[in-house]
Image: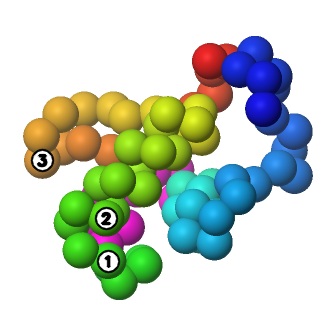
Amino acid sequence: MPENRRRTAGELPRGEQEQKIYRYVLENAYITRAQVMTLLDLKQRRAREILFNMIEDGWLRKEGASRSTIYVLNTTEK
């Protein structure tokens, strides 16, 4: 996908886990790493990896730091 392309309203991430996270954020405005661990029944390392990949792919944006980190929809173009 070209980096400058805007996402269409019906477009979803490729993977099933990423889609679950994306839908959760659409419904709840944000998600935390701990919530991802619970939602997908994952360990901390895998949850962090998925969130990092979603940030890199432009789906999510990280806000805050340390224990107050949340992940929200990325509304800006890459």
Q: Amino acid at mark 3?
A: Arg
Q: Nearer the viewer, mark 1 or mark 3?
A: 1
Q: According to the image, what is the colour scheme of the structure?
A: rainbow
Quadrant in the picture for residue 25? bottom right
Closer to the camera in the image, 37 or 43: 43
| Secondary element type, mark 2 | helix
Residue 72 disc label: none
Q: Amino acid at mark 2?
A: Arg
Q: Nearer the viewer, mark 2 or mark 3?
A: 2
Closer to the camera in the image, 67 or 7: 7
Q: Please report the residue visible at 21 percent of the width from the left and 66 percent of the height from the top.
A: 44
Q: Which residues are magenta?
A: 27-37
| Secondary element type, mark 3 | helix
Q: Which residue is mark 3?
A: 67
Residue 46 disc label: 2
Residue 42 disc label: 1
In the rendering, at what x and y percent does residue 64 appear? Answer: 25, 32
Which of disc 3 and disc 1 is earlier in sequence? 1
Tell me which secondary structure the magenta stretch mostly adopts: helix
Is 28 left, or right, of 68 in this rendering?
right
Looking at the image, which residue sits at the far left?
A: 66
Residues under numbered marks 2 and 1 in contact, where contact means CB atoms less than 8 Å apart: yes
Residue 64 lies, with reference to residue 36, above or below; the image says above
- C-alpha gap between disc 2 and disc 1: 6 Å
